[in-house]
Image (tube, rainbow, N blue to C red):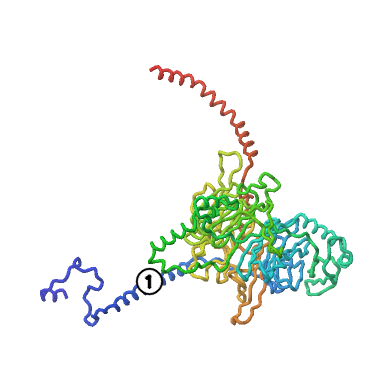
Amino acid sequence: MALIIKSLGVDPPNYDELSDDEDDFVKDPSQFRAALPQPYRFVDEVLSLFIDEVWEEITFKENEKAVERAKVRPPKYECAVEMQEHTQTKALAASHDGRYLFIASSGELSILDASKKKVLYKHENEHLDLHTLICCIIGVEIYLLVGLDEQGVCHVFSSADEKIFEMKVLNEDVGDKFHVTKCQPSSDGDYLGLVAENPTNSDVMLEVYSFPRDSWLKEIEDIKAKLHQSDAPKLQEAVEPGLEEKETEEPSTLTTGEGEEEEVSGRKSVDSVESKKGYNFKFTAANLVMRQHRPDKLQANQGISPSAALKELSDPKLILGSGHGHLLTRPYIDIRQEAFDELHRDKVMYKLTESVESSHLECNFHFFTPGLAIPYGIEQPGALKKPTSIGVWWSGSCQFIYYSLTRPVKVKKTAGDSQDAELDIKPETVWPQASVISASAVSPDSALVAIGLTNGLVTVWDKYLCCVRKSVLISKLAITNLDFMEPSICPQFNNRQRSYPTTTSCYILVRCADSSLHLLNCGPLDNAPPITIANPSVDDDHVITAIDIFPAKCPEVILKVHKNGTMFLQDVISAKTLCEIALPTSHELTTPWQPVMSISAFGQMLYIKGSQRNEEESEKSASSLFVFQFRSFPALDSYWVKSRPTVPYLTASPIETRVAALLRQRVKTSGERQQRLQKRWPLMKQEAIKIAQIKSH
């Protein structure tokens, strides 16, 4: 070919002279086509670019799937035990001592031995339909149960001696006006917080009740003594003064393990289940100590002149940090608004005419023990473990507000209705944040507070010292969930320069909006970046919807639930997926976005609700309660034998301990100081001579 070209007198082009244009090359004459005219050529380029980007995205996802398939898959355990008698389970609550599991079903509330999977007692009430259940310990083997039903009414129960007593219905009188959407008691059962919503005007308020725990414990002990002394029929005939029974009961029916029924007296046999409508006694009433609506939005100063604006700042209701104490008057704000609209005239036309607010307003709160933020009770050793304040933040707000629960309040009653009484509560302090708050968490002893923002920032506060311990940017997306891990799994910093205990370190499990998981060390001297233990989900099916942390037996293990219903156990320290938990192939999780599950018996049992798979969505699928025994999982064998020391979340030594430690250290080092003085004194004479010589010159 080259010889033919040279014979024609045409020199072949050199490689250096070739153009970089991909279209500048010799083509087959049959492939020559006329260039497309505009605008078709522009459309062709856009489509080609779009196809290339889509193909790159497809290739990237296929490569990720290939890498995922090449990984070693964790073992899959399908060893669930079905409990067919609990087909209408709606809520589960495990006791913190690991002994019992409380099951809320349609028309009943049951006590289950968490280790033996055996029903001990059933409290029947045809009007009871709880969908939320929370348990806390208020005494020795005495439990407080708080639940919400489908109508937004809050019920309070107590459990003692393997029996359930219905105590209070808090908002039954105003149930038609306000529906409770959230309830949370304090860890020791002294207080209860309720978030109530008015369906008519979407008004949301927070109510806090003080429970007379000491009086309740005494009344429960009297009931227990009476039940042990008398049989059930005798108890119905003669009731102790002050313990009034609401209805007369028939002899209880006990169902044996073989399905037979027998009629017995008040004492139940060991191998039987007691099922009664329950004894309803009168207990001491709870006190409403706080009712708080959402704080008012920022408004202009009402003063018409600078002097009048300064007088507005003298209002005692203004709280530092709330943003209401400013000198911006309405005329000044209007002028600034006009200047802004004029400066951004080309963009103002796209601004919404009406402000769009969140349709669902949420209120989140936590109870706190005494600290330097609100020091009331910090000087009383007996009150250090009792809640004295509550921290509140509202959705869409950037303020974390503290209210005191111990100060006397003023009650303002409206004319005609005492139910509309407002409790005049003034915030004690306000912590303004750099962005809108999206998540919060408190350590079990309420010593540490973690606040997550929509800009991906996590701030950890030392509540006892009232100072910021750490502020770290985790992600560019919002923080959706925060959980404190056990301090025993976190390496502790040993300050050898101090002879008394110093601040401890612990991990915080952070979940972001892209379903990624991070482990943040909130130690004061740890500057390491957060550890990523789960990357963002590739598709919607693998989005993490729920996380449950194991108790003290396996504190570094978490249970993850994905949107597609799959469940995994993961070690947060090594970021290794230990195993997959699967229900029988005929069942699936009832609600993967909010599963009904509970880890009980010190992390040895997992109770979870599953529904039968139904191809036709119109048919209502049957549900059952399944049990997994974690002791039988080989992947967890190494965790059960580990010994972990007990480490508190906060080590705050009082001043007496610190002074005594410093005195002991000084006495211990007295010999070393004497040796240094003996070496120093002979040198002082020589130094004095040198100084005198220098001055003489």
Q: Quadrant of residue 22?
A: bottom left
- Packing grade of label 1 (10 A; few <14, some 14-19, many >=20) is few
Q: Is residue 94 visible?
A: no
Q: In screen coordinates, is 384 left or right of 217?
A: left
Label 1's element?
Answer: helix
Q: Quadrant of the C terminus?
A: top left
283 or 301, nearer to the observer:
301
Q: Is residue 234 visible?
A: yes
Rendering coords of residue 66 (x, y %): 45, 69
Q: Amino acid type of disc 1?
A: Glu
Q: For the point 13% across and 76% down, which residue is it?
A: 4
Rendering coords of residue 420 (x, y %): 68, 63
Q: How many marks?
A: 1
Rendering coords of residue 671 (x, y %): 59, 28
Q: In screen coordinates, is 594 left or right of 46?
A: right
Position of residue 619 relative to residue 225, above or below, is below
Q: Quadrant of residue 15?
A: bottom left
296 or 91, nearer to the observer:
296
Q: For the point 63% across and 77% down, which residue is it?
A: 612
Q: Which residue is mark 1?
A: 53
